Each structure stands twice: as structure tokens, then as C-alpha cells.
Amino acid sequence: MKLNQLIGLAFAVMLPVVAQAKVVADVDIAEQATFAQQALVLNGAGVRSKFFMDLYVGSLYLPTAVNQLDSVLEQPIAVIQLTITSGMITSDKMRNAIEEGFDAATDNNIGSIKSEIQHFSQLFADEIVEGDQFTFVTQKGKGVTSIKNGKVQGDIAGEAFRQALLKIWLGDNPAQKSLKQDMLAQ
């Protein structure tokens, strides 16, 4: 009888975790998270793919759910999380994609944030492997903290940089339109 009770207790403890997770492309996405001492909710999550291959799962966490870029930019904190799902992503490919993303997000006008982009790009110099998770904690008026696999990589100050980074996935020329729609729950 005690074994059955232990199994039941174990299942009861695990149930809330399972109920609060969303699965996207075999990646568990938490429905809630805490970053910078702020409780956030999953706004949306989707897959970035290219040539029919899933590259990563992108998720957006906010204090309150919204479905427009302007509303995201007004939030005091917004978190983009990327979970790598393909071994095809290398550090060089990621840096190139990030730089192209900034070009698209700023209509090729990166002049005022060029040094911030260069600093940010260097955060992807280490090897990238399937399962790596990049988290970009953006705080209005402050900038961005970049985290890889739970370890802080660095901070990049500046509101213009913060907005441009968010626009890579959520702007008028996003990395992928379907991912933007999924992250904004449109």
C-alpha cells in the first residue's frame, strides 16, 4: 500500500509541472518564468525553420500577454528565449543571422547601435550545439542581458539596441513571419 501511495504522491507532485508546460517541436516551454526578479507569462512560442528544417524554438515572456509589437516595447521587461533544435546552427551562422536580423530590424540603419551589435555578436563566438538555450532579458530604458544555458554572458546597454533586438523576431521584417505570429499569439 505504501508503494502505491508513493507513486500517487510522485504523480501528484509532477502533475502541476506537466500541466504548466507547453511543447513546441519537442521542446518543453514553461508557461511562467521569472527573470530579473519579475514573474512573467509565456506570451507565445513557435519554430524558426529554414529549408524545411527546424532550427530553434523561440518563446516570448512578458508581464502581461499582448499581441502587438508596440505593446511589447512598452512592457518594462520582455524576454526572448531561443532553444536550439538543430545541429546545423554554428556560431558563425548564428552571428551572421543576428547581424542580418539587425539590418532588417533597423531598415539597414544600424549606425547608432553598430558597436552594441558587434559586442552582442561576439556573445555567439563559442560553439553552439543542439539543446543550447539563449535568453535575452530586455529591460525598457536599460538594455539587454544575454544568458546562455543559464549563465550570464554579458549586458548591452541602450534602449535603441533593446528595441532593435526585439524587432528581429517581432518587427515588420521578422526572422520568420510565422514565428512572429506564434510569439505574439496572433
Image (cartoon, helix red, strand yellow):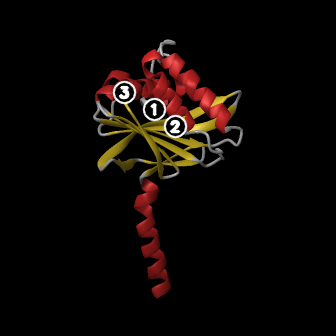
**For residue 57, side relative to residue 156 (left or right):** right
Q: Secondary structure at mark 2?
A: strand
Question: What is the quadrant of residue 93 in the picture?
Answer: top right
Instruction: Give the alpha-carbon distance from disc 2 to disc 1, as whole Å.
Output: 7 Å
Instruction: Give the alpha-carbon distance from disc 1 to disc 3, as whole Å.
Output: 8 Å
Question: What is the quadrant of residue 78 in the picture?
Answer: top left
Outermost bottom residue:
1
Q: Secondary structure at mark 1?
A: helix
Instruction: Give the alpha-carbon distance from disc 3 to disc 2, as whole Å.
Output: 15 Å
Q: Secondary structure at mark 3?
A: loop
Tell me: residue 147, above or below residue 77. below
**Disc 2, disc 1: CB below 8 Å?**
yes
Who comes first in sequence, dot 2 or dot 1? 2
Who comes first in sequence, dot 3 or dot 2? 2
Query: Can you give x and y, in whole percent of width and height, for residue 48 in the image?
Result: 59, 32
Residue 67, which numbered label? Answer: 3
Query: Can you give x and y, in whole percent of width and height, for residue 50 in the image?
Result: 67, 28
Q: Which amino acid lies under the numbered mark 3 shown in the image of this protein?
A: Asn
Q: Residue at x 61, y 40 (%)?
A: 125
Residue where numbered disc 2 is placed: 58
**For residue 150, side relative to residue 40 (left or right):** right
Who comes first in sequence, dot 1 or dot 3? 3
Q: Which amino acid lies under the numbered mark 1 shown in the image of this protein?
A: Met
Q: Residue at x 33, y 44 (%)?
A: 40
Q: Residue at x 70, y 43 (%)?
A: 87
Tell me: residue 111, above or below residue 17. above
Residue where numbered disc 1 is placed: 183
Question: What is the quadrant of residue 98 in the picture?
Answer: top right
Q: Residue at x 55, y 33 (%)?
A: 121
Q: Which amino acid lies under the numbered mark 2 shown in the image of this protein?
A: Gly
The answer to whether one can see residue 50 in this image is yes
Q: Nearer the viewer, residue 152 or 82?
A: 152
